[in-house]
Amino acid sequence: MNHDINIKKLRLNCFRQSKEDGKFMLQMRVPGGFVEAKYLSMIRHISETWGDGNFHFGTRQTFDICGIPYENIPAVNAYLKDYIEEVDEQLCQVNMDQVAGVPAEWDRRGGYPTIGARNISACIGDYHCICGNINTFALARRLEKLIFPSHYHIKINISGCPNDCNKAHLCDFGIIGCAKIDYHPERCIGCGLCAKMCEHGATRVLSLNEKNGKIDKDPCCCVGCGECVKACPAGAWTRNPKQFYKVILGGRTGRQTPRTGKMFLNWATEDVIAGVLGNWQKFSAWVMDYKPEYLHGGHLIDRAGYKKFKEIILEGVELNPECLVAEDIFWHETEYRSNFNVKPLSAHHTAGPQPEGTHAH
Amino acid sequence: MGFRIEAGLADEILRELKKSYQIYAPKRFPGQGRFAETDLIRYDEVSALSEIVFDEKSDYPAKEVITPIQQAIFYFTEEEYRASRGKSKPILLFARPCDINAQRVQAKIYAGNGGYEDLYYTRMRERVKFVLMECPGGDDTCFCASMGTNRTDDYGMAVRPDGAGGLLAEVRDEELLPYFSQAPAADFTPAFVTENETAVTPPEIPDKETLLKLKAHPVWQEFNGRCISCGACTLACSTCTCFTTRDVVYGDNPEVGERRRVSASCQVEGFSDMAGGHSFRPTAGDRMRYKILHKFHDYKARFGDMHMCVGCGRCTSRCPAYISVTATVAKVNAAVAEIRGALGQ
Ligand code: SF4
Ligand code: SF4
Ligand code: SF4
Ligand code: SF4
């Protein structure tokens, strides 16, 4: 078929090119992967009216509707108005009339304005899970407005506990809900079950002190999972009601240098996470000299260097007293091609403001 | 005498009472439940009426006040030792009928067991006056009516929240009466639950042969796969009394220290181990059998007046493996019926 389609523009509008001629796939945001079931009837309507009758759970928890012919896109976008208004504007209180903080009127019948900041994915968290330490989708909804709409790319994965079912270790900015655990020795019967569970399922930081029948804890390496709380028959371990998070930074998959993320923050509060993400647009803009490219967050950190990232991202953020910050991060990448980074100086990427007339690359 | 006590006055009375009494009641600990963002309700000292949880059953029983999970029983220095003194201030203990009746059981075990009287239990029990919390009906794990523990008259006063932050109270104890001189009189006597959503019939085991056959019956084997032997049921139990003693030395001097009493659980592996490694109840099923028969047969066979279980249902509520005590007793009853049928009884 003879098409003349600006596929880059469509991609920014969250329609992905298909191997099938003239067809596209819509990706709908579902912050935290959690919405009322009533929206499934919208998915069905879009799919059966304009698509091929199927849908796929996107790997980032988007509702993906495939087989949409190019001609149908305006009708789909007009229909999306209610969904975007209800989910993003109302539930997440996103200001849709801006892009990365710059005022830009949103065409309400034009679908999604940007694709850069990816859907924030989350495990079910403590809404349901007996291991979860935090309400993951409530956090996703709070963070959505800080990163969307924006052309700067960031993938955020939220896990409710250090079991990390939602792979915070494999995205730009992974958030893990952690609990600080308080010990009430006067309630402890010395059964040792908590120590067994910590050894079996966590970091082996607890041991039964045979001299006093109480538990010794090596506080250095508690991951804050809460397995000890779950195990104790006497309520001798309890989660501190203050909620904490780890941030795992710079993980990624990909064709070039996939790697597992490393810990950036430990025992940060939700306000600190929100403060840090509030600086994300500023950091991205600075690295790319204010010209957004299709480039994921982890690569931006590589270009700026971790120390520069840390400097910009922590600007004006008041860290809670428990919060620990990585002084440096040494990622370990899979090098599909050895000495991947060794190349002519002219081929090196740059970061930050560039001389007039040149582009960051 | 009955009184109507407005919210403000109730706290004033509580403040006055605290001068002469320690006041313990079920209290909410936000976020301290087993799972994230769930609460724990357990006994603690209270200073305001609003701290007391009336409408929900506590996760842990009132026995924690009288027989704490851990207490020092004596202190030693070289070859000298002396018993811990304990406190002398009397205690007002807010409790539902099941928890109050549970003290009849604990008293039998600690102070009526073969003529031996346990000093630590008795001295604590003597300090306690109960404040009966009228039970608003319990939940679907409760079966006090089946166990005959839904009523009690062992209380110095009884209370019902009036729904507006105040109380209706019946004060029987002469020593408590003067505290209520400011409160207008009102007609109030506590009501008792007469029926629960769940009912239990303790097993009828008429003879030794049936008992032996029941002990060997496959009904217990189900628990080998289900019970994780955590002991949460016995810690939550209103009547369980098992404890262990432990000597703890202070710092690096082995000649100075204390002997402690610490709660123990028959459900935890190793509880019944003897020196030499022999274990009486090596499987979870064996331990479940021991617990259930103790609660619903053995205790009554020995002491006669009542079963050991008071039907508070806390073991069911706290079990992380969803093992229901009422369902378990029903299974045991079916096993007994099968055995008796086979014996032609
Ligand atoms: S919260 Fe810490 S101490 Fe408890 S099980 Fe997990 S790692 Fe071990
Ligand atoms: S599980 Fe609880 S009671 Fe058992 S040793 Fe650990 S803290 Fe103590
Ligand atoms: S056995 Fe269960 S229901 Fe009976 S008194 Fe103990 S905790 Fe309550
Ligand atoms: S019955 Fe339940 S609470 Fe009791 S030991 Fe077994 S698993 Fe734990």
Image (spheres, coloured by chain):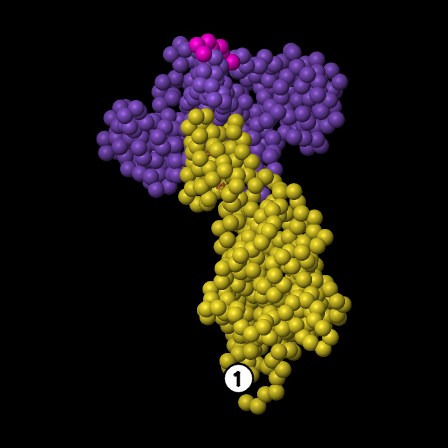
Chain colours: A yellow, B purple
In this rendering, position of residue A336 left or right of residue B217: right
Relative to B78, say whether B100 is above or below: below
Viewer-proximal residue among A341 and A193? A341
Viewer-proximal residue among A12 and A35? A12
Q: In which image quadrant can residue A60 be found?
A: bottom right
> Where residue B200 appears, x then y in whole percent?
42, 32
Q: Which residues are magenta?
A: B78-84
Can residue B156 be spotted in the picture?
yes
Viewer-proximal residue among A311 and B156? A311
Q: Is residue B162 magenta?
A: no
Task: Locate the C terminus of chain B by quadrant.
Answer: top left
Residue beneath the point at 47% across and 66% down: A335
Relative to B223, say whether A145 is above or below: below
Task: Locate the N terminus of chain B by quadrant.
Answer: top right
Q: Which residue is mark 1?
A: A21
The total number of labels drawn is 1
Residue beneath the point at 61% across and 87% down: A4
The chain under label 1 reads A
In this rendering, position of residue A83 left or right of residue A162: right
Q: In which image quadrant can residue A74 be found?
A: bottom right
Specify the farthest residue to the left. B343
Residue beneath the point at 46% across and 45% down: A202
Residue beneath the point at 48% across and 68% down: A339
What amino acid is at disc 1? Asp
Element under label 1?
Answer: loop
Can residue A135 be spotted in the picture?
no
> Where residue B282 appears, x then y in whole percent?
31, 33
